[in-house]
Image: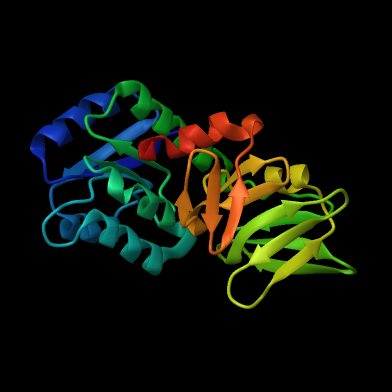
């Protein structure tokens, strides 16, 4: 597997640093580097770019604005982004644009490599639709067995999931309330994209881009407080380490 990538950063030293790291990862194919997000946008439209290593604070179009533009233009087919920034404050916003990872400068090689393998896993699984007797994922939606029907639910509409013995409540945005899906937490966890959802409790899986606030042991989505139990705290800490 080879992943075509670019660097977008207005700092020449940061670009040089990333070029060295990328040269040590055999499955990354660095196409070129850009110091201007607008130039990068033009190139993305004409080249097969799969992954972008991108700063956030840049003159003109910011990295976050570019990410939102790409998401609006290409949806699930947009290049995936690993943000590399000197500021922690943008981390949660990064996950809201479905970034694969968010690394803080100065970037350590082991953190960079871990992010790259996350990207490799994502692209390896991207074209493999997951099939299950009571749920399956195709592109940006999932079918769930609700009573006697298979109901389509868009992943972007899911707030969080609460598991019970024989079913899962899937809480949705807006006034849609929840669906009572005839499946198990384990079955659903295996079908949901790992970059968009995280399990924090035996009974709860949350949508990353719907998180409004976090502490070391809780997650807040709207007015709902969801506990993070000891069993899942290590994974949660890895996800949220930039805030603590």
At 53% from the left edge and 36% from the top edge, which residue is drawn?
236
Q: Is residue 160 above or below residue 18?
A: below
Residue 39 percent across, percent down from the top left: 16, 57
Residue 7, by quadrant, is top left
Residue 47 percent across, percent down from the top left: 30, 53
- Quick check: 151 left or right of 197? right
Residue 156, by quadrant, is bottom right
- Quick check: 205 left or right of 51? right
Residue 220 percent across, percent down from the top left: 53, 54
- Quick check: 55 left or right of 183? left
The mark tally for this picture is 0
Residue 27 or 96: which is nearer the viewer?
A: 96
At 63% from the left edge and 78% from the top edge, which residue is drawn?
175
At 37% from the left edge and 40% from the top edge, which residue is drawn?
243
Residue 104, by quadrant, is top left
Residue 171 or 27: which is nearer the viewer?
A: 171
Q: Quadrant of the C terminus?
A: top left
Residue 103 visible to an observer of this rendering: yes
């Amino acid at each position: 597997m080879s992943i075509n990538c670019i660097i977008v950063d207005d700092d020449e030293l940061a670009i040089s640093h990333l070029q060295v790291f990328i040269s040590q990862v055999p499955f990354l194919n660095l196409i070129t580097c850009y110091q201007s997000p607008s130039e990068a946008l033009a190139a993305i439209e004409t080249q097969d770019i799969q992954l972008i290593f991108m700063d956030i604070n840049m003159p003109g179009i910011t990295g976050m604005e570019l990410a939102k533009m790409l998401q609006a233009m290409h949806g699930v087919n947009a290049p995936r982004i690993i943000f590399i920034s000197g500021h922690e404050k943008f981390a949660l916003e990064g996950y809201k644009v479905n970034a694969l990872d968010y690394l803080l400068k100065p970037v350590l090689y082991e953190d960079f490599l871990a992010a790259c393998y996350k990207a490799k896993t994502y692209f390896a699984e991207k074209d493999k639709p997951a099939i299950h007797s009571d749920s399956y994922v195709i592109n940006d939606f999932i079918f769930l067995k609700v009573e006697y029907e298979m109901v389509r639910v868009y992943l972007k509409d899911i707030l969080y999931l609460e598991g019970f013995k024989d079913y899962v409540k899937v809480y949705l945005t807006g006034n849609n309330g929840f669906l009572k899906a005839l499946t198990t937490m384990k079955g659903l966890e295996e079908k949901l994209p790992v970059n968009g959802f995280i399990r924090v409790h035996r009974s709860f899986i949350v949508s990353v881009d719907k998180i409004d606030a976090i502490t070391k042991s809780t997650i807040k989505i709207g007015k709902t407080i969801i506990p993070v139990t000891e069993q899942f705290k290590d994974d949660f800490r890895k996800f949220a380490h930039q805030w603590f």
